[in-house]
């Protein structure tokens, strides 16, 4: 049979191959697979009558448990990595969208400045070519999800025959705008005075716009180039409603944002708030991860959803210099940690979060109750699972070690159906049994139930404790053969030929009665 074709995208396949958790899980599975095949082959080729068959069965059962656990670990690692990949792809798309918006704004803002200062402020008509450029860029900006400034009525002229009015879509900067003052006039205030020139040089240098010396010498070319860059950056801020009374104040903001990485030119923060449906998927997965094998109740979903959304709004995704960092991380793991610890804390530092709203605090308290329930339920479920599996094993004559029981309980905790494990135990018990017994075992009937009438008959006739009769007892096994069940009456008669019968009270009574009858036949009176 040809191997199944991997339907995942090439980029996802490449991403998975570079994730350490996936690589380690795949390697662990691959390393053990060959050993497992050898154990499986030995089990299949060993007759049930072999002296060491029970040891081989135990080894095979342990190997099967381990290979299943390794397979699940690989699947879980790939699923978690796939979720990370999809989140990163979404973030990259959003980041590119923002970067494209910035590029358009960088072209658009100088045109706004030119139109507003050169034409609108002077009461002159705006050339149609300039308005056309602005309109074209504004259209591109809207397509990318940007928001051009609201329009104002302006008069346009053209060197051709077409004259009239045209409605532009740019604003005049507000009265407090740093760009209202003509740049030449602004620069003149800092010439001819060493200290004022130093002040301007330092402000431009702090904003990472000027690389020259801060020495009070007004180098017109360098300073003009720096101011040109400054005006472009200030224009970007003003399209987002961030205005400044003058250029020096604007340069202070640019300097602060350069140092901290903030501002429109700094890292881009995006907030992804999960929908309730998406959050419910995370929540149910987290419950199973912590050992609660059920879906969340409506109340639990409401509370966990509220805390998750609060966390998503606080711990955002940031992108700087092409590097994306999700401060919240894997949502399922975040919720699992909430349930496990019962505390809503900073997922990066583990410290308490300040400024949490009362409704979120109240929701977090409910999570604490879920945490207590999870720990109790986990312990109770584990204990009940072990008891149930031990009962199934005993009812089928299978001996399980404490380690095997613990491993089975862990499998159930990780999502394996307990009925599957019970079926595996019955399959082991059926090795060497007639087909009709195997069929009953496959249907979920224990050996204890199948042989119960015959065990009771043996206990009564041979006067022994029924619990001491094992399923490997050849007399008990003879009750059901390839051709069907022996009638109970015939089975009871056959028991009298068993060596154990001669030591019973029934045997002695039977002998006494036989001897008495013989004596009576010879005329003796009992």
Image: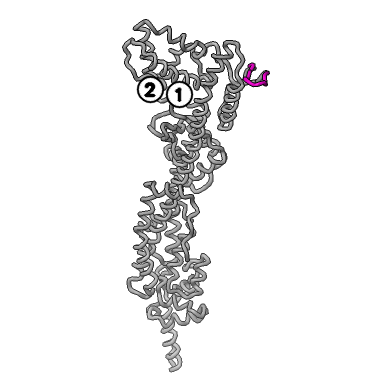
What residue does disc 2 label? 259
Q: Secondary structure at mark 2?
A: helix
Residue 160 among magenta residues? yes
3D distance between C-alphas at marks 2 and 1? 10 Å
Mark 2 surroundings: few (<14), some (14-19) or many (≥20) residues within 10 A: few
| Residue 372: quadrant of the picture | top left
The reply, left or right, for residue 279 in relation to residue 458 is right
Q: Which mark is residue 464?
A: none
Residue at point 53% right, 19% down? 241
Is residue 132 shown to the viewer in this render? yes
Secondary element at tag 1? loop
Q: Is residue 10 above or below residue 340?
A: below
Q: Residue 493: where, in percent of width, then height?
A: 47, 82
Foreground residue among 340 and 213:
213
Q: Magenta part of the protein: which range?
A: 154-163
Q: Which residue is label 1 attached to?
A: 263
The residue at the far front in this view is 160
Q: Report the front residue among 251 and 384.
A: 251
Query: In the picture shown, does residue 227 fall above or below 444?
Result: above
Picture coordinates of residue 491 (x, y %)? 48, 79
Does residue 179 appear left or right of residue 67 in this picture? right
């Amino acid at each position: 049979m040809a191997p199944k074709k991997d339907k995942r995208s090439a980029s996802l396949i490449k991403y998975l191959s570079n994730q350490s958790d996936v690589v380690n899980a795949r390697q662990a599975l691959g390393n053990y697979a060959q050993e497992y095949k050898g154990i499986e082959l030995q089990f299949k080729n060993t007759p049930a009558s072999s002296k060491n068959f029970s040891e081989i069965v135990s080894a095979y059962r342990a190997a099967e448990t381990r290979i299943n656990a390794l397979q699940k670990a690989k699947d879980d690692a790939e699923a978690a990595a796939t979720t990370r990949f999809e989140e990163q792809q979404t973030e990259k798309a959003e980041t590119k969208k923002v970067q494209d918006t910035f590029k358009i704004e960088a072209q658009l803002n100088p045109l706004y400045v030119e139109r507003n200062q050169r034409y609108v402020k002077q009461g002159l008509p705006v050339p149609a070519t300039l308005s056309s450029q602005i309109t074209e860029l504004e259209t591109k900006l809207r397509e990318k999800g940007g928001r051009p400034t609201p329009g104002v009525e302006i008069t346009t002229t053209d060197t051709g025959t077409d004259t009239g009015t045209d409605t532009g879509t740019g604003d005049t900067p507000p009265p407090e705008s740093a760009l209202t003052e003509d740049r030449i006039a602004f620069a003149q205030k800092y010439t001819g005075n060493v200290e004022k020139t130093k002040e301007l040089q330092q402000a431009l240098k702090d904003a990472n716009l000027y690389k020259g010396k801060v020495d009070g010498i007004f180098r017109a070319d360098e300073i003009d180039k720096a101011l040109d860059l400054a005006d472009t950056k200030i224009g970007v801020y003003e399209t987002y409603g961030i205005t400044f009374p003058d250029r020096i104040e604007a340069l202070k903001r640019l300097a602060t944002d350069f140092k901290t990485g903030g501002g429109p030119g700094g890292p881009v923060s995006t907030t992804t708030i999960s929908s309730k449906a998406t959050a419910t998927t995370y929540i149910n997965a987290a419950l199973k991860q912590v050992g609660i094998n059920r879906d969340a109740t409506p109340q639990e979903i409401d509370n966990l959803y509220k805390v998750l959304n609060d966390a998503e709004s606080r711990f955002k995704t940031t992108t700087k210099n092409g590097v994306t960092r999700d401060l919240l991380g894997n949502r399922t793991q975040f919720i699992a940690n909430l349930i496990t610890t019962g505390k809503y804390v900073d997922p990066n530092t583990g410290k308490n979060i300040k400024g949490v709203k009362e409704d979120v605090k109240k929701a977090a308290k409910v999570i604490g109750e879920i945490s207590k329930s999870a720990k109790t339920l986990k312990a109770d479920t584990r204990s009940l699972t072990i008891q149930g599996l031990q009962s199934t094993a005993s009812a089928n004559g299978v001996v399980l070690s404490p380690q095997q029981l613990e491993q089975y309980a862990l499998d159930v905790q990780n999502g394996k159906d307990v009925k599957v494990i019970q079926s595996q135990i019955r399959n082991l018990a059926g090795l060497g049994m007639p087909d009709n017994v195997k069929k009953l075992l496959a249907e979920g009937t224990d050996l204890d139930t199948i042989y119960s009438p015959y065990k009771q008959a043996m206990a009564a006739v041979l006067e022994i404790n029924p619990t001491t009769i094992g399923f490997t007892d050849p007399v008990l096994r003879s009750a059901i053969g390839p051709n069907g069940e022996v009638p109970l009456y015939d089975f009871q008669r056959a028991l009298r030929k068993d060596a154990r019968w001669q030591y019973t009270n029934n045997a002695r009574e039977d002998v006494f009665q036989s001897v008495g009858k013989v004596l009576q036949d010879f005329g003796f009176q009992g």
